[in-house]
Image (spheres, rainbow, N blue to C red):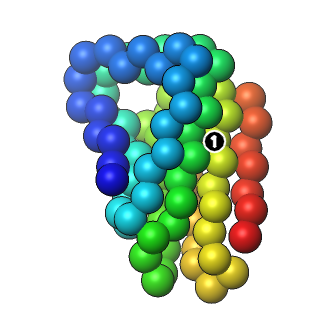
Amino acid sequence: SSLNVNGGTLKLNGSTITLAGSATPFSYTTGTINAGTSQITLNAGLPNATVFEGGGATYYNLNQVTGAWRSFTINGSNTFNNLNFSI
């Protein structure tokens, strides 16, 4: 699954979102993101790399769950309340 934001407003508020199985499970290019106290969890579902395209926005909590052999890249000058990684 993936979430792509290209224009408009994404109101996350207190949402819990889990995305998996995509090389770029989250991609934000334009628009407005209201992060609130949301939890975004990315579960790596591919054998290689996972990319978070944050677009320079502010997020609340981002959790990355990945296997030891996978890489994770965050693109954009993003701001996070908490950034968590687990293997």
Q: How many marks?
A: 1
Residue appearing at x 53%, y 60% in the figure: 43
Where residue 31 appears, as percent x and y from the top left, is 31, 21
Where residue 55 appears, as percent x and y from the top left, is 43, 37
Where residue 76 appears, as percent x and y from the top left, is 51, 43
> Which image quarter holds the C terminus?
bottom right
Q: Eyeballing the image, is 53 above or below 14? A: below
**Residue 37: in sight, yes or no?**
yes
Among the 4 quarters of the image, the one containing residue 32: top left
SS assignment at label 1: strand
Among the 4 quarters of the image, the one containing residue 45: bottom left
Residue appearing at x 33%, y 42% in the figure: 3
Q: Please state if 68 lies on the left or on the right of 35 as rendered.
A: right
Q: Please state if 2 lies on the left or on the right of 18 as rendered.
A: left
Q: Which residue is mark 1?
A: 62
**Amino acid residing under circle 1:** Leu
Q: Please state if 25 lies on the left or on the right of 4 as rendered.
A: right
Residue appearing at x 38%, y 65% in the figure: 21
